[in-house]
Image (cartoon, rainbow, N blue to C red):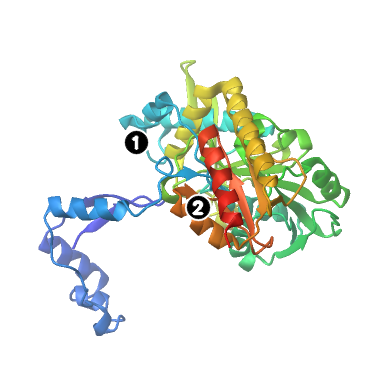
Amino acid sequence: MTLANSCSGGSPSTFIPNTDHDQQAMLDAIGVADFEDLVADVPEAYRHPTLDLPPAAHEMSLASEMAALASTNYIPGDYACFLGSGAYRHYIPAVARKVANRGEFMTSYTPYQPEVAQGSLQVAFEFQTMVSHLMGLEVANAGMYDGPTAFAEAALMAARITKRNKVVALDTVDERNIEVLRSYSHYQGIEIVRASSADLTVPNDAACVMVQSPNVYGVIEDMGAVSDAAHAQGALAVASVNPMSLGMFKSPGECDIDIATGEGQSIGVPLGFGGPYVGLFTCKDSYKRQMPGRIVGKTTDTNGETGYVLTLQTREQHIRRERATSNICTSTQLIALMVAAYLATLGKQGLRETAELCYQKAHYAASQINALPGYSLVSDGTFFNEFAVSCPKSSQSILDALIQRKIIGGADVSNRVPNGIVFALTEQNTRAEIDRLIEALDEIGSMS
């Protein structure tokens, strides 16, 4: 039995060994005789269950078994990949990866003591600055869990600001974002209303209108129109954006969005089996004290030297619980470092060039697929690097057939579009891969 030395903001760090005498002293202090008394409420049959485990294996055979399991994965690179819908395969320059893997950063944790955490704090400050510029809004925090939870936190923030409890979300928002929003708002007394993006009507008791751009079909939404409609009813405008698209398209700030969020994965974070990622969260300056999470500030110390500190921490473990804006506590600073290193490496021009490559390759692929018999684009709206296609056969049968040809197809959206698939392209997709996809789709579509 050991005691874990755990920080309040995350997982346990070092395990501290203790003697039998230490353990007995602790048991005496809480008034129990032995460890079994601590688990007396757990039925005995479940305290030490029999586990059906295979025989122990030595390291070499175990490594072979793990390699065999890994070989069953469909890996981008080995397979041509056109799957996106929230997670994208972008090239991360070697220098950005090198910076993010330095030991000083890999071992960093929540910087409660600024005098020994200036490096981590500066990274957070630089991350905030870059995200703020990218989103076109005055204030950014040091990061959220991921994009969907940032989106949900934005709704709670809007409800606090407006003192209203109705959230309007466009019907073109990815349902996974809505599911997280439901989880966050269920016990907050907040009502979620879905609205048509084609004919938006905002009730006069709405806290905010929530839009996703590019939307679930890959189409760029008119965030300015959403903002105007929301503000006309005294509501806030909230947007979730793909930050890579901002290398080409207007930022949320330029569209008068009040709170903008996003998933940071596309700007410097590898796919990594779905995480960990980092949520982007920005807002207008007038709303910053209702922002969840942390904000790192830059100042000058008594010696005139630049210093970085945690300026605002509106989470429940730092202030009175009833005044807290959120209970987010896990640090995402390592992932934020990846984003900062990536953006610093690319710069404005590099980000724009990458976005343009994504755009051009997606539009080439879309035009070729749209010309195939039985295939058609779902929308004629402006899109960035994703587009929805209605197919001549069931979505799953086409995706299965593509896998047989070593092609990872797009996302199945047949729940929204008959036989619908959303294909995503990035700068990583070569002309040969795209032409191979088009040839495969033509062949699959013509098969009886």
The residue identified by callout 1 is 106
Quarter of image, res 365? top right
Asked whether residue 237 is in view, the answer is yes
Q: Position of residue 281 (x, y in %)?
A: 61, 42
Between 217 and 203, the one nearer to me in the picture: 217
Quarter of image, res 131? top right
Q: Is residue 110 left or right of residue 236?
A: left
Q: In what quadrant of the picture does the C terminus appear?
A: bottom right
Between 9 and 227, the one nearer to me in the picture: 227
Q: What residue is at 19 percent from the left and 50 percent from the top?
A: 63
Q: Amino acid at mark 2?
A: Leu
Pointer 2 local density, CA inside 10 Å: few below 14, some 14–19, many at least 20: many
Depicted 258 relative to depicted 361: above or below: below
Depicted 14 relative to depicted 267: above or below: below
Q: What residue is at 18 percent from the left and 68 percent from the top?
A: 54
The residue identified by callout 2 is 402
Q: Amino acid at mark 1?
A: Met
Cα separation, mark 2 vs mark 1, equals 39 Å
Q: Is residue 37 left or right of residue 382?
A: left
Question: Regarding mark 1 in the picture, which secondary structure is present there?
Answer: helix
Q: Position of residue 376 (x, y in %)?
A: 71, 51
Pointer 1 local density, CA inside 10 Å: few below 14, some 14–19, many at least 20: some
Q: Which marked residue is nearer to the observer: mark 2 or mark 1?
A: 2
Question: Regarding mark 2 in the picture, which secondary structure is present there?
Answer: helix
Between 338 and 294, the one nearer to me in the picture: 338
Asked whether residue 216 is in view, the answer is no
